[in-house]
Image (cartoon, rainbow, N blue to C red):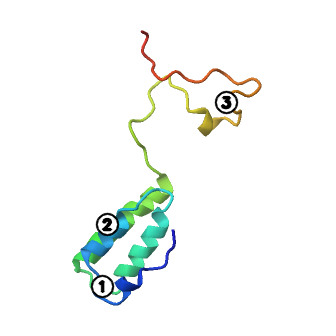
Amino acid sequence: MSQAESPDRLNRDVTVDDVRQLMGASTPHFALQLRNRIARLIDPLAADHPARVLGEQEIARLTALGFDGETRGHHAEAGMRTLRSVTDAVAIGGVGAEAPEPHTTADH
């Protein structure tokens, strides 16, 4: 993702929709680039401009997202191991590898 701005946004008044278009692509991987683009976009706007107000809220969210990441689904449950891809360098199926985690913890 580039931090360069779309030329059509540079030659007209900034709108709330412009900020929303940038917000739509927000993931932890691109959060800080998007934050910088929104900051540049709203910089010349008055403090009470609707696009600036929304942009400043989004900058705070993107900063947190970029540094803290995100949690999808629910947090880990007590007694569940962390996925090997996150905690262990041993390849699945390699020498000494354990059996993969079952898909459920229910005893059926």
Q: Residues within 10 Å of mark 3 (few under 14, many from 20)?
A: some
At mark 3, the secondary structure is loop
Q: How far apart are the two marked residues, 3 and 1, measured between alpha carbons?
A: 53 Å
Badge 1, how many Cα within 10 Å: few under 14, some, many 20+? some
- The mark lying in front, picked from 3 and 1, is 3
Residue at the location (41% across, 85% down)? 7
Amino acid type for the residue under numbered disc 3: Ile
| Amino acid at dot 2 | Gln
Question: Toward the viewer: 77 or 34?
Answer: 34
In the rendered structure, the answer to whether residue 76 lies left or right of residue 82 reads left
Left of 5 or right of it: where is 82? right
Q: Position of residue 94 (x, y in %)?
A: 74, 28
Q: Nearer the viewer, residue 90 or 53?
A: 90
Percent coordinates x, y for residue 102 in the rendering: 52, 21
Type of amino acid at the residue the image marks with label 1: Leu
Q: Look at discs 2 and 3 and give the one toward the viewer.
A: 3
Task: In the rendered view, tell whether residue 81 sits above or below residue 65.
Answer: above
Query: Mark 2 or 1 closer to N-term?
Result: 1
Query: Which residue is denoted by mark 2 in the rendering?
Result: 57
Numbered mark located on residue 45 in the image? 1
